[in-house]
Structures are given as C-alpha cells and as structure tokens.
Image (cartoon, rainbow, N blue to C red):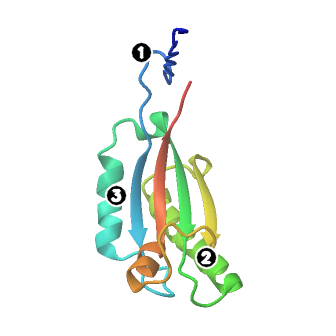
Amino acid sequence: MKPVVFLLLLFWPGPISAQQPEELRKSIYFGGGSYLVDEQQAAALIAWLDSIPDLLNRYEVHLISHTDPIGGKAYNQWLSHMRSQAVKEILLRQNIPEHKITAKDWGLENPVYSNSTRRGMAMNRRVDVILYPIVY
C-alpha cells in the first residue's frame, strides 16, 4: 500500500506586521427622480467626515453613484451624475479639494440590490462615498 501525502498550502495576504487601513463607506440615499441631499443626510455626512482623523492625508475620496431603472438609460445616467455632483458640492464646502475627489456614475448599470422590489430600487438610489486608504 502506498502512503498518501497531503499538501497543505497557506496563503498569507501580506506581511504580518504591516496592517493596511480598510476602506470606509457611507451611503447617501435619494427619492425617486431626485438629486437633492436632504439636510439630515448632509449633516450626517459632514459629521462622518469630521470624525476621520487626517482624512486628506490618509484617504482618497470616491463617489459611486447609482439609480433605479425607472426612466430609461439616458435619464438615469444624467440623474446619476447629478446625484454625485450634489454630494461632491457638500465635500467641496467641507474644504476637500476637488483633485482629491473622483466620481463614477453608474446610472442604472451594475445595481447592487435587486430592482425587482421597491426596497431594492430604493437602496439603488444612492451615492456611496468611499474613502480608499492611500498606500505609500
């Protein structure tokens, strides 16, 4: 009888001592057909940004905008852009330089939630503010 040899491979994602900060995320939600950021969400976004120490030196700011499918592709692309611009204006008023902000307007493409339910469509009407760590 031949012996059975088991090979165990371990994959380690990186050095044990160098832990990278994780991305941070906050979503801003919109009503159907709207690109207005309500005062409560604007205040929550500002408080969230203010709570992050050394934000501009540690993170890049990305805006990822989505819509539900109501209204067609061209309309939703425009609406997606208007939503990301509305959030960008809040960031600019918080003295985040424009060159630190990038935006991707998905419109109705690549929904994260199912558009087959009202709840899913409501969850897709949003802009995700994502802070990606700057890695040196």
In the drawing, what numbered circle is on residue 108? Answer: 2
Left or right of residue 31, residue 63 in this image: right
Q: Residue beneath label 1, please?
A: 16
Q: Label 3 sits on what residue type?
A: Ile
Q: Quadrant of residue 28?
A: bottom left
Q: Is residue 106 above or below residue 132?
A: below
Q: Label 1 sits on what residue type?
A: Ile
Residue found farthest to the right: 74
Q: Nearer the viewer, residue 104 or 69?
A: 69
- Tell me the SS state at disc 2: loop
State the image coordinates of residue 2 (x, y, percent, origin top left): 55, 9
- Tell me the SS state at disc 3: helix
Q: Upstream in the sequence, badge 2 or badge 3?
A: 3
In the drawing, what numbered circle is on residue 5? Answer: none
Left or right of residue 119, residue 34 in this image: right
Q: Is residue 95 above or below residue 40?
A: above
State the image coordinates of residue 91 (x, y, percent, origin top left): 46, 58
Q: Residue beneath label 3, please?
A: 46
